[in-house]
Amino acid sequence: MPHHKSAKKALRQSEKRRLRNRMFKSRVKTEIKKFLAYLEQGDLEKAETQLRATQSLLHKGVNKGIFHWRTAGNKISKLFIKLNKAKEKLQVESAQAQ
């Protein structure tokens, strides 16, 4: 346990930050799961709007210092790759149906 006044304050601040970061990361994970659920359902329009919202959240997390910019970039890139593969798959299926 801290003995000095400044150390006690630092402990309080770090605990607040930890809880805020944890809440934010949990929110981002939930948004990613929503995006993946829309992809599974095949609803590409909703998936795309959800991806934009998730991308915005990740960028906000970078600005707040919660995520490293490369980590956020990698997550966004992987999600866009999944969306593009789903779109490509839909185009191939529609082309084969004709």
Image (cartoon, rainbow, N blue to C red):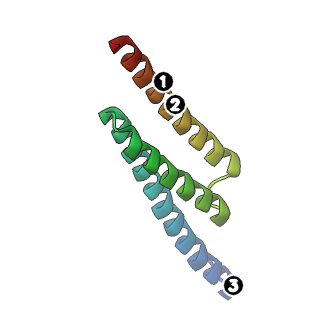
Q: Is residue 20 visible?
A: yes
Q: Earlier in the sequence, mark 3 or mark 1?
A: 3
Q: CA distance from mark 3 to mark 1?
A: 57 Å
Q: Earlier in the sequence, mark 2 or mark 3?
A: 3
Above or below for 92 versus 10: above
- Seen as rendered, the residue at the extreme front is 98
The answer for how far apart the CA atoms under marks 2 and 3 are is 51 Å
Q: Position of residue 24 (x, y in %)?
A: 49, 62
Residue that badge 1 annotates? 88
Q: CA distance from mark 1 to mark 2?
A: 6 Å
Horizontal and vertical percent for residue 65?
66, 62
Q: Nearer the viewer, mark 2 or mark 3?
A: 2
Residue type at mark 1 is Glu
Amino acid marked by disc 2: Asn
Q: Could you tell me the amino acid type at mark 3?
A: Ser
Left or right? Give the position of 31 relative to 42: right
Circle 2 residues within 10 Å: few <14, some 14–19, many ≥20: some
> Residue at image x 48%, y 47%?
51
Task: Return the x and y of residue 49 as percentages of the image width and height.
Answer: 45, 50
Examine the image and state in which quarter residue 44 appears. Answer: top left
Q: Label 3 belongs to which residue?
A: 6
Give the residue at x 66% y 88%: 5
Please, what secondary structure does the residue beneath circle 3 have? Answer: helix
In the depicted structure, whether residue 74 falls above or below residue 30 = above
Q: Is residue 1 visible?
A: no
Q: Position of residue 97 (x, y in %)?
A: 33, 14
Indicate left or right for 48 with 59 as reference: left
Q: Which mark is residue 84?
A: 2
The answer to whether the residue labelled 1 contacts the one labelled 2, judged by CB atoms less than 8 Å apart, is yes
